[in-house]
Image: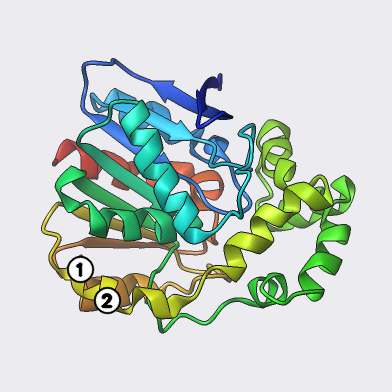
Amino acid sequence: MEKNSIVLNGKKISYIEEGSGHAPTVLLLHGVPESSLLWKKIIPVIVSCGFSVIAPDLPGFGQSDPFDEPSTWERYEQFISDFTSEMKMDKFHLVVHDWGGLIGLKWACDFPEKILSLVISNTTISDGYQWHRLAQIWRTPGAGEEIMKRMSDWSQFQSGMKKSIPNVDDETLNDFFQVFRTAESSRVVLELYRSGNLEKVKTYNAKLTQMDQPVTIIWGEKDPYVPFEFALKLQNECLPHAKVHIIPNAGHFIQIEVPNEVNLYIQQHFKNT
């Protein structure tokens, strides 16, 4: 899938844009260690529903340049403001996964007037979440840097990811690997995880309850990083009107693992909004 690029705040930002420029816009936000190619098999279905899609590589991921300053949670939220302003996206539908959700949902709570609907997958901004084992290592100074040395080995990264996502293609895998290539590039992940103080989001659950836009929540039943109970928690505590779909035997990277099932719920969402 071909990428475009713009220069934003002096940095190259790569993104995928598909669909008619006159159609309602959908912004897709990926997580770690991903890129816009996470959405490769999802984008055509959204476009077929009559929408225009924009999916950026977040700074430091895929083909986008990193920030000059630390890659913190707050800095990525500012990026969403800067990027959507540059792309002239006034109101849009928001689709998020993994860290794209921590960034995007927090941003949506601060700018609810810009959000037309939400599709949320395998992510949480709950302060009840416990970081998974690898995240805990990344959040630990010294240990995080040490494991990044091993993750910069392409063959090891490739074999590890293919255990998680057996059907991932080489183009996507190579794009995901970009953030791990060097000690400098991998700082993006370490800085982001170390800025992830979930105490910051206590007030955001209350803000989420104020959002009455259509919401669809899609999750893999066997997600080892964000258990599917957080899908139900999100609905029960914040978004009671959300439609929740738990996909059996699917893991974390559902957009690649089980795209047909994800697209079924994506179609339902966008045909009803």
Q: Nearer the viewer, residue 162 or 210?
A: 210
Image coordinates for residue 16, horizontal then vertical, percent: 48, 26
Q: Is residue 52 left or right of residue 1?
A: left
Q: Secondary structure at mark 1?
A: helix
Instruction: Look at label 1 and name its amino acid.
Output: Lys
Q: Is residue 152 left or right of residue 166?
A: right
Residue 201 sits above or below residue 42 on the image: below
Counting labels gives 2
Q: Is residue 125 left or right of residue 26?
A: right
Q: Is residue 261 visible?
A: no
Residue 73 sits above or below residue 5 on the image: below
Please give the name of the residue rendered at 45% of the width and 64% of the height, measured from the top-left corner.
248
Please give the name of the residue rendered at 50% of the width and 71% of the height, measured from the top-left corner.
226
The circle drawn on residue 269 is none
Disc 2 from disc 1: Cα separation: 7 Å
Please give the name of the residue rendered at 63% of the width and 41% of the height, measured from the top-left corner.
66
Q: Are marks 2 and 1 in contact (CB under 8 Å)?
A: yes
Image coordinates for residue 129, horizontal then vertical, percent: 46, 80
Image coordinates for residue 56, horizontal then vertical, percent: 48, 34
Neighbours of disc 2 within 10 Å: few (<14), some (14-19), many (20+): few
Instruction: Look at label 2 and name its amino acid.
Output: Thr
Please give the name of the residue rendered at 22% of the width and 77% of the height, measured from the top-left corner.
236
Residue that carries the numbered disc 1 in the rendered image = 207
Image coordinates for residue 109, horizontal then vertical, percent: 24, 59
The circle drawn on residue 203 is 2
Q: Quadrant of residue 205?
A: bottom left
Residue 207 sits above or below residue 133 on the image: above
Residue 27 sits above or below residue 95 on the image: above
Q: Quadrant of residue 32?
A: bottom right
| Quarter of the figure that contains the N terminus | top right
| Quarter of the figure that contains the C terminus | top left
